[in-house]
Image (cartoon, rainbow, N blue to C red):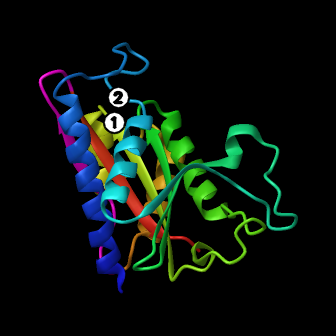
Amino acid sequence: MNQNTIQNLVDKLMQETAGSLNNSLKYYWPSKTNKNTGNALHEGNILMHLGRACLNNEWVVYQQAARHSEADQQPPQHGASGWLDMLAYNPQNRIQLRVEAKRFIKSDSFSKISDDIQKINNFRLNRVDNAESEILNPKFTVGLIAVVTHDQRKKDWWDQQHANSEEDAINTLLSRHLRNTAPAEKDSTRSLSLINSYSNGWLLYAWHFVP
């Protein structure tokens, strides 16, 4: 299995996620409409439909997986920061998938997405209660950032990975990360449309091999 194969697997999951979510959005757009949030969906909608796509493709899925420390294998006492949005595993290809989802709205979203990338990279599984599980020793460990936005500028930035003057420092940092962690054979950033009669938006995603 090479990078292109993993890209194809991730693309398939995200295309099914967007398709399933779009089908639901034909009937209702469940978000606020004000200056702070615009029309962006809550990221929980991504996770729900991505989980369904994983299950339909013979992945096993765990929502809100607890993060454990390397030393004592106890969950860290840091509240929400101790949880990964979604953990999935593909037994056929022995791929461990770590997912964080976000709404990409205001300028601080750049920083939050950068934090989520670090959360993915630093995540430790519970080895005490799962000593014999093959998920602990995958052939590939992949991090996936999935983002929903209604902002055309942020969608364009994601596609192009260009920094701009609006959120310069953090934007540049995140852009550099996406370039550095994207597979060498081709860039892993993608965008999919979420458009219907109620509103519009985009599902953005990028994956990387976890170091």
Residue at (26, 71) in percent of width and height: 8
What element does badge 1 sit on?
strand
> Residue 59's quadrant in the figure?
bottom left
Residue 69, disc: none
Q: Which of these two is toward me, 122 or 128?
A: 128
Residue at (60, 80) in percent of width and height: 137
> Is residue 114 visible in this depiction of the protein?
yes
Q: Position of residue 164 (x, y in %)?
A: 39, 44
What element does badge 2 sit on?
loop
**Dividing the image into 4 quarters, which one contains the C terminus?**
bottom right
Residue 149, disc: 1
Q: Which of these two is toward me, 209 or 111?
A: 209
Mark 1 neighbour density, 10 Å: few (under 14) some (14–19) many (20 or more):
many
Please state which amino acid type lies under the numbered disc 1.
Answer: Thr
Q: Position of residue 170 (x, y in %)?
A: 53, 46
Identify the residue under disc 2.
Answer: 40
Q: Which of these two is toward me, 143 or 37?
A: 143
Residue at (48, 33) in percent of width and height: 107
Query: Measured along the vertical axis of the image, is residue 80 above or below residue 209?
Result: above
The range drawn in magenta is: 185-199
- Residue most extreme to the top: 34
Indicate left or right for 200 with 74 as reference.
Answer: left
Indicate left or right for 163 with 130 as reference.
Answer: left
- Of the numbered discs 1 and 2, the one sitting upstream in the chain is 2
